[in-house]
Amino acid sequence: MKKFLVVEDSPIVVKIIKHIAKLDQSLHFDIAMSFKEAKALLEDNGVKKYLAAVVDLNLPDAPDGEVVDYSLSLNIPTIVLTGSYDEHKRDQMLEKPIVDYVVKESRFSYEYVLKLIHRLHKNQHIKVLVADDSKTSRKFITTMLKPHLYQVIEAEDGQQALDLIHQDSSIKLLITDYNMPVMNGFDLVKNIRREVDKNSLVIIGLSTQGSGGLSAKFIKNGANDFLSKPFSHEEFHCRIIHNIETMEHVETIQHAAYLDYLTNLFNRRYFYEKGEEALAHSHKNNRPTCLALIDIDHFKKINDAYGHDAGDQTLKEVASLLQQAFGRFIFARMGGEDFCVLLPGLDIHKATTLLENFRELVEDHIIMLDNSSVTLTISAGIAADLSNTLDELMNEADRQLYNAKEAGRNQICAAD
């Protein structure tokens, strides 16, 4: 993570920020005690070094918030951290493209600022699509999003927005107006939700006040949230942050559910889910696909001779080699010493060559166990897709794996 700049003349506030930041090793920052020091740091280090600036409004050489205008003029995302709550001053600041206006009220205020820094870092990788037929409205929303470092894309109507989502699955947030030509926001949400669930794409609906039950209608048909126009700066960003963080929490839980606890490879559940999707895609596009089952030869002997910790280490090292060899494919630990790889785009000959290379890689690898050097071998069975189901491919690969073991192990058997 890039550094952030703290512009603050209070030693107590600086001490608090330093103390809280110590709990998070990823946070790095420079401190300026005056406007002059801030300018010097930015000139010496360069603007690009800083992810954001956290600035006080009242400095000895900048008593009226001049440092805010300066940091904004350099296009640095700026968080105002002030000691007094002045409604008029707050409104003035929120009219500027600042990230947020935070009052120094308690420890939570400082924790919130550091949370915003993390949010800015993550936002750099989040694509937001703004769908509205009004150029003025799109510009207004985009202007609010840009200081938070989102990647913003615009669409003039619902159909254009739908096309963009089909083209780019990395879009994570859609902000859509209701009244649009070609396809309105409500129909847009319905079309999206036929293919993309709420945990993969956040949708926030917008409309003018007095639209009756539109908010309920939006949410009942798939939107995550709804805002009535006009809305405040803080409400807008609170809703967005809340929904994005919910999506990220779900993604974290799903990711954990898909991981094998020992090797950090994906597990059987992930393999079946993603494998069936990939196989269906291959059938649709008439692409060759192969599936390989891999087994570590005589794995039980390692556990018996060196103990289960050594067995765990062996599995981890084979998993690392598997990632090295099959990083662009779908692979997983299926349980015990068994691994599986789905190879979309490869016919049986290319798949066999790749598996043979992996067999040699494992055979040449040396594992150190209890001051002893140990080498391994693997056996594998490969099945080629002939409009099969994933289970059918798995069964055929298992038969070929059995043939490889019966033939003496340390070899690859493939089904013609």
Image (spheres, grey):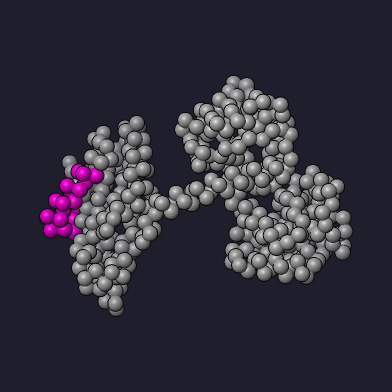
Q: Is 407 in the magenta?
A: yes
Question: Which residue occupies the foreground of this view, 95 or 367?
Answer: 95
Q: Position of residue 165 (x, y in %)?
A: 53, 34
Quarter assignment of residue 285: top left
Residue located at (20% from left, 56% from top): 379
Labels in figure, total: 0
The quarter of the picture where residue 286 lies is top left
Residue 27 visible, this angle:
yes
Using the rendered view, name the quadrant where residue 4 is placed.
Answer: bottom right
- Return the residue found at the far bottom: 371
Asked if the stretch drawn in magenta spans residue 109, the answer is no
The spot of residue 210 in percent (x, y) is 71, 26
- Residue lying at 33% horizontally and 39% vertically, measured from the top left: 276
Left of 117 or right of it: where is 328?
left
In this view, the residue in front, 281 or 241, is 241
Residue 373 against residue 105 in the figure, above or below: below
Most extreme residue toward the left is 407
The magenta span reads 394-412
Q: Residue at x 69, y 33 (%)?
A: 228
Split into 4 quadrants, where in the image is the N terminus? bottom right
Magenta part mainly helix, strand or loop?
helix
Residue 249 position in % (x across, y down): 52, 50
Question: Can you say whether 191 is above or below 70 in the image?
Answer: above
Does residue 37 show up? no
> Image point 69% across, 60% down: which residue?
108
Q: Horizontally, is 132 left or right of 331 in the view?
A: right
389 versus 402 height, above or below: above
Q: Position of residue 367 (x, y in %)?
A: 29, 70
